[in-house]
Every structure is written in structure tokens, then in C-alpha cells.
């Protein structure tokens, strides 16, 4: 009898050593995703205990700057897809972005995330300039989240100070990926992820939980795929139907707890990963992000984007903090962390994966990175 057949939810905390021999399979994860009552609570508790044991009590803050909502792509689920003409578009200039990064220091965030639609107006040189100027002001970890770029650009970003990169694979099913992304394919996405890691950048990816057509089995497969990628950060959030998109009327999951159970399982399968309580959780539950932080997550991403731009960056409806500005989110964030009895990390919160130190040693020299420019 395999490990999975005998692995009831009630034995979850004892399983880490066993998994090295026989990791849970799709059927097992489907059962966990369907867990109810005491089993469900057990799953949440096990994830919280694993989080405490492997990544500790600290919550890492990453201030996010959504610097452009202009996007060349038409992902079927996304509220800022190119064809959505209802969106008022904006683009911050380089100096404005650098200025906002300085705000992150004032708020005490050791990391910023620079995120945008796939806006090719920012050239590779522009992005490198932004990274270098921000780094000149002192230590601040920088995560980029600007989508698919020619592979050689990732090496240049790395040489200019990019510490981490976030790009979700969205779904591990190649057919579903192509259906959802009319101008993209999964192979191309995975090729970019590989190049980012090869450039010596900490890698973050993840998927949309509950995409139409995926089912519990699809979620189970995505959980296993994310695990196989051995990611430094794993960001997943619920799919939320967005007006003005082809999926505007698609249903969400009936059992809303599945969204949380997926995060809990993610923690159990990836004990050392940084797992954010993604913003979309607040769109489906009041204080949803707080709950995720007690069910496996250890990262929170306060928004630094100036309030006037926020209504334009609604990838999904009901996004929180649309009427707030950076100051309010900074204050609110501290309150949230304290309300759940945790503390704010003082360090940059780099990868906690045991293999990360070897990867730092193997990081390509900057000369290699500029060779591809
Ligand atoms: N619901 C939830 N998340 C979404 N994203 C895009 N559109 C939606 C939506 N409708 C997520 C994608 C993307 C990330 C930046 O936002 O997973 O990778
Ligand atoms: Fe933005 Fe609470 S995190 S207002």
C-alpha cells in the first residue's frame, strides 16, 4: 500500500520525513482539498505549524508599486487585458518609480515589488536604470514582476540589482493555458522562468486557484507542479471573474475554503518557500489575507501605488485598498500583523530554501549578463 493510501489528514504533521520517499499524489491532494469539518481544521493547523517550524514567526513585508497598467496581452481572466477599453490607462515615469521606492524605505519595507502589465515602452535599459538608481539609495531588495521578456534581459536585470522575479505559470495544463492566453503558451512561460533562475534571480511563480475547467484535480496538479519547480516564492490566489473580460460570467468555486486549503497544502509541500497572503484573498473574504497568514503564508505585500492610480489596476473586482494610499496601507499592515500575534521581519527576507546559498555562489558574473544586451 502506498504512502498516499494511508495518509489521512489527521496524520499531516508527521509526514515531512515520509514525503521524501513518497510525495502525496493527485488523488491524495484531491482528498485534502475536499477535507471538511475536523479534517479541514487539522489541515490548517498542520500548515500553520509547518510555517512556524520552517520559516518562523516573522512576516516579510514587500511593498508593491503597480507602475503601469498598460499591457500588450489579452489574458482571458485579467481586468487590464489590452482589449478592455473601459480601463483608464496610466504609466509612471522612471523618476516617479524611483521616488516611490524611496517611500518604501520610509515605511520600513525591506523589499519592493515593481509590477506592471506587459508594457514594452519600458526598455531593458529603462528597467536597468530604475534598478540601479534605486540601489544607489541604499540596501533595498527589488522584485520585478513585468512578465515575459527576451531571456537575455533577465541577465541584465540581475546584473543591475534585481534580486527576485515573480511570474505565475497560472495553470500547469498546457491546453488550458493556451485557451486562457490567446497570445502565449505554457512552454514559452516556463522557458522564461528557467532563464530567470539561470540568471541568478530568486524565482517566484504560482497559479490561479479555481480557474474554470480546472476542478479539484486541476488544483492538485498545479500544487504538485509548483512544488516540482522548487520555487523560492509561491504566490497563488483565487480566480475572480472580472468585468470586461471573456470570463466575466465564469463561476467561482462553491466551497470557498478550497482557496485556503490550497495554500495550506502548498505550505506542507514547500516548507521553506516564501508564500504571500495574496491581495485577491481580501477581495473574496473580509480580512482574507489575515486568514491566509494563519494557514501557511508568511509574506504580506502592502500597496505603495499612489491612490489616484489604484482604480486603474483592478485585475479583478472588489480589490482592497483602492481608496487608500501608501500611508494608510503601511499603518493597516502593522495592525494586521499584530492582530494575529506575529512580528514584522527586520531582514530582507531572501530565499530560505536550503539550496539558495549554492545558487548565490553560482550566480553569473555581471559581465555575462551584459553580453546578451
Ligand atoms: N482574478 C484573480 N487574479 C487575477 N490575476 C489576473 N487576473 C485575475 C483575476 N481575474 C492575477 C494573475 C497574474 C497576477 C498578477 O494577477 O494570476 O499573474
Ligand atoms: Fe491597504 Fe489595509 S492593507 S488598507
Image (spheres, rainbow, N blue to C red):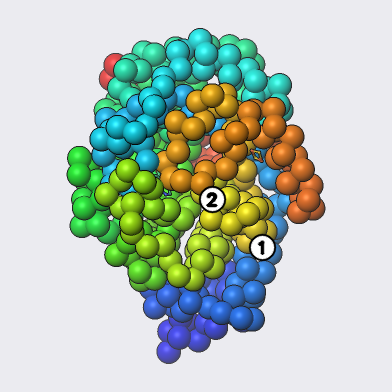
Quarter of the image with the C terminus is top left
Q: Which residue is drawn at the image coordinates 41% and 19% (left, top)? A: 91
Q: Quadrant of residue 1?
A: bottom left
Position of residue 285 in the picture relative to residue 242 (left or right) = right
Q: Which residue is drawn at the image coordinates 67% and 69% (left, top)? A: 45
The percent position of residue 344, horizontal first and vertical second, equals: 74, 41
Pick whichever, 354 or 189, lies toward us.
189
- In the rendered structure, find residue 48 and report the number of the disc placed on it: 1
Pick whichever, 157 or 209, lies toward us.
209
Position of residue 285 in the picture relative to residue 337 (left or right) = left
- In the rendered structure, find residue 283 and report the number of the disc placed on it: 2
Position of residue 137 in the picture relative to residue 146 (left or right) = right
Quick one: label 2, few (<14), some, or many (20+) residues within 10 Å?
Answer: some
The percent position of residue 15, horizontal first and vertical second, equals: 57, 74
Quadrant for ligand 1 reads top left
- Which residue reaches farthest front? 86
Amino acid at each position: 500500500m502506498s504512502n498516499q493510501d494511508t495518509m489521512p489528514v489527521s496524520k499531516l504533521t508527521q509526514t515531512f520525513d515520509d514525503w521524501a520517499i513518497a510525495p502525496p499524489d493527485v488523488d491524495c491532494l484531491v482528498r485534502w482539498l475536499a477535507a471538511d469539518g475536523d479534517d479541514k481544521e487539522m489541515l490548517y493547523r498542520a500548515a500553520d505549524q509547518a510555517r512556524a517550524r520552517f520559516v518562523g514567526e516573522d512576516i516579510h513585508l514587500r511593498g508593491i508599486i503597480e507602475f503601469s497598467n498598460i499591457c500588450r496581452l489579452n489574458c482571458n481572466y485579467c481586468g487590464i487585458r489590452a482589449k478592455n477599453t473601459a480601463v483608464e490607462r496610466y504609466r509612471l515615469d522612471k523618476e516617479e518609480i524611483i521616488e516611490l521606492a524611496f517611500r518604501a524605505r520610509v515605511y520600513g519595507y525591506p523589499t519592493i515589488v515593481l509590477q506592471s502589465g506587459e508594457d514594452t515602452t519600458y526598455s531593458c535599459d529603462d528597467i536597468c536604470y530604475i534598478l540601479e538608481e534605486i540601489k544607489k539609495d541604499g540596501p533595498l531588495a527589488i522584485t520585478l514582476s513585468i512578465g515575459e521578456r527576451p531571456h537575455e534581459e533577465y541577465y541584465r536585470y540581475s546584473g543591475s540589482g534585481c534580486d527576485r522575479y515573480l511570474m505565475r505559470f497560472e495553470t500547469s495544463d498546457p491546453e488550458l493555458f493556451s485557451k486562457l492566453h490567446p497570445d502565449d503558451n505554457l512552454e514559452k512561460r516556463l522557458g522564461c522562468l528557467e532563464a530567470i533562475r539561470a540568471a541568478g534571480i530568486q524565482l517566484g511563480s504560482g497559479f490561479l486557484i479555481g480557474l474554470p475547467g480546472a476542478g479539484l484535480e486541476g488544483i492538485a496538479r498545479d500544487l504538485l507542479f509548483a512544488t516540482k519547480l522548487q520555487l523560492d516564492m509561491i504566490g497563488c490566489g483565487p480566480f475572480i471573474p472580472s468585468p470586461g473580460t471573456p470570463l466575466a460570467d465564469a463561476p467561482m468555486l462553491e466551497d470557498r475554503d478550497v482557496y485556503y486549503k490550497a495554500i495550506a497544502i502548498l505550505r506542507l509541500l514547500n516548507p521553506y518557500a516564501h508564500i504571500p497572503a495574496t491581495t485577491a484573498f481580501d477581495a473574496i473574504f473580509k480580512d482574507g489575507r489575515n486568514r491566509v497568514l494563519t494557514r501557511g503564508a508568511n509574506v504580506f505585500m502592502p500597496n505603495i501605488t499612489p491612490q489616484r492610480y489604484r482604480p486603474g489596476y483592478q485585475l479583478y473586482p472588489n480589490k482592497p485598498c483602492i481608496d487608500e494610499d501608501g500611508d494608510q496601507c503601511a499603518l493597516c499592515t502593522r495592525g494586521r500583523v499584530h492582530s494575529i500575534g506575529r512580528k514584522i521581519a527586520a531582514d530582507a527576507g531572501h530565499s530560505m530554501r536550503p539550496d539558495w546559498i549554492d545558487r548565490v555562489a553560482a550566480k553569473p558574473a555581471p559581465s555575462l549578463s551584459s553580453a546578451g544586451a
